[in-house]
Structure formats: structure tokens, C-alpha cells
Image (tube, helix red, strand yellow):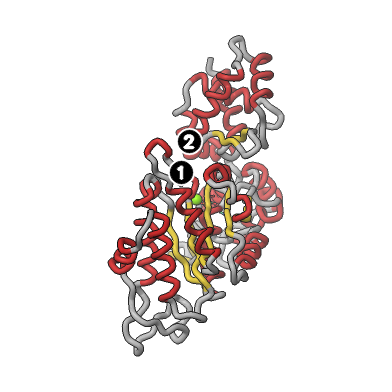
Amino acid sequence: MSIIDTKSDGLPEFANPFRPGAGHQPPYLAGRDDECNEFDGALNQTRILENLILTGLRGVGKTVLLETFKPLAAKKKWLWVGQDMSESATNSEINLAERLITDLSLLTSSFLVSNERQASFGFGREDIIAHRPIGYKELKRVYEETPGLTADKIKGVLFFVWRSIPQGMISGIVFAYDEAQNLVDHKHKDQFPLSVLLDVFQSIQRMGIPFLLVLTGLPTLFPKLVEARTYTERMFHIIFLSQLSAQASREAATRPVQKQECPITFSESTVDQIVKMSGGYPYFIQFICKEIFDVWIRQSRLGQEMTIPTLEIEKKLDNDFFIGRWANATDRQRQLMHVISMLENCDTEFSVQELVNLSKEMLSKPFSPSQTNQMLVALGDSGLIFKNRYGKYSFAVPLLSSFIKRQIFEACLSG
Ligand SMILES: Nc1ncnc2c1ncn2[C@@H]1O[C@H](COP(=O)(O)OP(=O)(O)O)[C@@H](O)[C@H]1O
Ligand SMILES: [Mg+2]
């Protein structure tokens, strides 16, 4: 955060510090100390018994927290490998292998040839003296020359990398993959990239190699892993990120503007309103604060009283965040989502039976259990709903129920 300009009236201009946007580091990361401590604890393992899953709804702060873990890992001399698990990386076993080899080679290519030069690995120059660089080609050669199936070949590469690392100087390697809900097995194509990944890590961890897997993704992630390999229940510790506490939400809103040069402050009642509107969801906090900040700067320049344009912000949020997802649903799917939004427990989890019952009360053409099931699957595919491990469902988008109620209300008003 910095003063970027000086206006002609001599007042400093303070750049809007808020950062609504996927993966954008917030000006102040609020309320995630416990999660950082859990990650820090996982780094104390010399033999990996517990890997991590970081899961939660969209916009809750998984990506930025994963990024925050990086320096914690470096402090304890863990190396870091990672990327987004794009769909193309996961549609076949060979693509998964390619992803891992490419990511690893970015790290291992900084292992140096001569004894004179030193590789820093981000820990400081004098820390590590490596033997020679290992580039993509060499890792690929090891992959090709290792006999067996894809899983054996990947294991061969990982084993080779571990042996090449100057022993005793590095605690291990964190393999951090974001958007890991994209990982799936494709039975019909006889391709099992997800199972391969799990088998490989389970096996090398059993050999005592400290390669820690940290997977981040939507709440569909863990059920998918368990479906692929039941042993994953024991292999992972799950950190479920939810909305921020009231206190942490307040800090997320106020800390970024508590700077000497900042021309505006949020009063207690303003913060109350931000917390209420955002439901404590980090993306919404950033979004709402950014809007208020801009409007208040404008209002103060014009000498106007500073007010929160609640309706305008809500409208903008609807357009930017919700409308696209809603517009892609069919009329009948919207009807079902309307029924969901009228359930008392719509913001937690609900069952097919509850929906069937309520739809009988609400609709002239109610949903049968099988229709409901089918439609929930379709809504799951379009990322609006997810099914948890116990067969219950939840909205996959935070605050979706309030949006739906607004939509229905507007539709009633207009016709
Ligand atoms: N703990 C936090 N405190 C304040 N803002 C946060 C926090 N976590 C995330 N954010 C903000 O929320 C938004 C969404 O974060 P992101 O990590 O992309 O979410 P996810 O990966 O879960 O979809 C970003 O604008 C980010 O700056
Ligand atoms: Mg993300």
C-alpha cells in the first residue's frame, strides 16, 4: 500500500488497498492463524503420515492461504513445487506425469554443476551446495528409463530427485496443487491420474521420503479422493476454510485503511454493515470495501456526506459474481434452487427428501425424488451445488441463497 500521487489540492492520494479477485493477496490476511499453525505443524513431520487438504467454497481464501504457506515452508527448509491442477493436466496419467516432471524440473534445474557456485533455493546463498543441475530432459530420461507403469515411472523420478538433493540440508519438498478438485479418474478411458497421484505419494512416503502433498480445492475434492482410494481418509488432514469470524472480518476491513496517510476511516457501524453484507466471506469483504472506498473518496472530494451505497454494491456484486452462474441454469433448475433457498437450512446442508417435501408445498408441479437427484447432479456439474460425503447437499457458491431470493423478488415485482 502506498501513496501513488499527490493531487493538486495537496492532499495525498491513497491507492485503494482492497483486492477482490481470485488469488489476489489481500492487503491484510485476517483470521487464518490457526490454519497457518496447522501447516507449520505438518512441516515438523520427518516421516510423512499426514498430508493436507485445504478446502472450502469459492472465494473463501484457499489460494491466498496456500501462497501464505510458502514462506513458512521456506523458513523450515522445505522446498516448494506447485501449480494449478488444470483440467488438461489431469485428463490422462501421462499428462499428470508431465505436470509433475515439469514442476519439479523448475526446482531441480537450480541444482548446480560445479562446487564453486551455490544454489540458494530461496533460503539464502550460503545454505546449500548442490552437485549439478537437473533439468527437464534429465528427469524425463529417468521417467522413460524406469520400467513399469506410469506410477512406477513417476516414483522413479521422485526417488531420483530426492537422492540428488544434498541430504541433511533440506527438510523435504511440499507439492502444493491448487484447484485439485479437477483431478479425476476416467474409467471409460482407462486413465486413472488421481489414483496414480495418491498411490505414488503413499508409496514414496512409506519409503520415508519427506514429500508432503498439499491439495487445495472446492468441497468436492475430498469425497473424490476417498472414492478413488479409501486409504486417503487416513492419508490427509482436512482444513476446512469457512467464512471469517466477526472479529477477523472486522480486521480484514479496517486494517488496510488504518494507515496514517489513508484519507478515510470506517466507523464501527460501517464495519458492522460490511460484516453483515459480506457474511464474513473474504471475497465479499474485499469487494464491498473496495466499492465503499472508491465511493467515499469521490464523495469526500465533492464535499458530500459519506454513505454506503448498499443497493448499488449489491447490484454490482450480483452482476459480477452471481448472475453468470444463475443465467446458465435452466428454468426448472432455477425452480429447484428457489426451493432450496426457501429451506431454513439452505446455507448449511440439506437432503433430497427435504427438497421433495418442500417442493410439494411450493410448486404446482413438484419434483419427484428421482428428478431432484438428477437435477442436483446437473447443478453439481455446473458448480452450483455439491454433495458431501454423507449424501447431503450444499450450495457451492457462498451467499447464493440471498441472491436467489433477490432474483425471485425482482421477478415478482416486474411481472
Ligand atoms: N483471510 C483473508 N483476509 C482478507 N481477505 C482475504 C482472506 N482470504 C482471502 N481473501 C480475499 O478473498 C478473495 C478470494 O481469495 P482466494 O484465495 O482467491 O479464494 P479461493 O481460492 O478460495 O476461491 C481475494 O480477493 C483475497 O484477497
Ligand atoms: Mg482459488
Image location of residue 394, percent across then percent down: 61, 35
Image location of residue 176, percent across then percent down: 49, 59
For mark 2, give the secondary structure: helix
Tag 1: amino acid: Val
* Apparent side of residue 215 relative to residue 344 in the rendered image (left or right): left
Q: Is residue 85 visible?
A: yes
Check residue 184 in the rendering and tell me which mark sits there, or answer none.
1
Work out whether residue 210 or residue 104 is closer to the camera in this orientation and state it.
Answer: 210
Q: Residue at (53%, 34%) from the top-left corner?
A: 384
Tell me if mark 2 has few (under 14), some (14-19) or many (20+) residues whose alpha carbon lies within 10 angstroms of its own: few
Q: Quadrant of residue 82?
A: bottom left
Q: Residue at (61%, 60%) from the top-left corner?
A: 50
Q: Earlier in the sequence, mark 2 or mark 1?
A: 1
* Apparent side of residue 404 relative to residue 13 in the rendered image (left or right): right
Q: Compared with residue 49, is residue 336 higher up or lower down, i.e. above or below?
A: above
Check residue 79 in the rendering and tell me which mark sits there, or answer none.
none
Verify CB contact (< 8 Å) between mark 2 and mark 1. Answer: no
Image location of residue 240, percent across then percent down: 63, 50
Q: Residue at (44%, 64%) from the top-left corner?
A: 81
Disc 2/disc 1 C-alpha distance (Å): 31 Å
Work out whether residue 412 or residue 168 is closer to the camera in this orientation and state it.
Answer: 168
Q: Compared with residue 81, is residue 358 higher up or lower down, i.e. above or below?
A: above
For mark 1, give the secondary structure: loop
* Apparent side of residue 179 relative to residue 413 in the rendered image (left or right): left
Q: Residue at (65%, 65%) from the top-left corner?
A: 37
| Residue projecting furthest to the bottom | 116
Q: Which residue is labeled 2 in the image?
A: 319
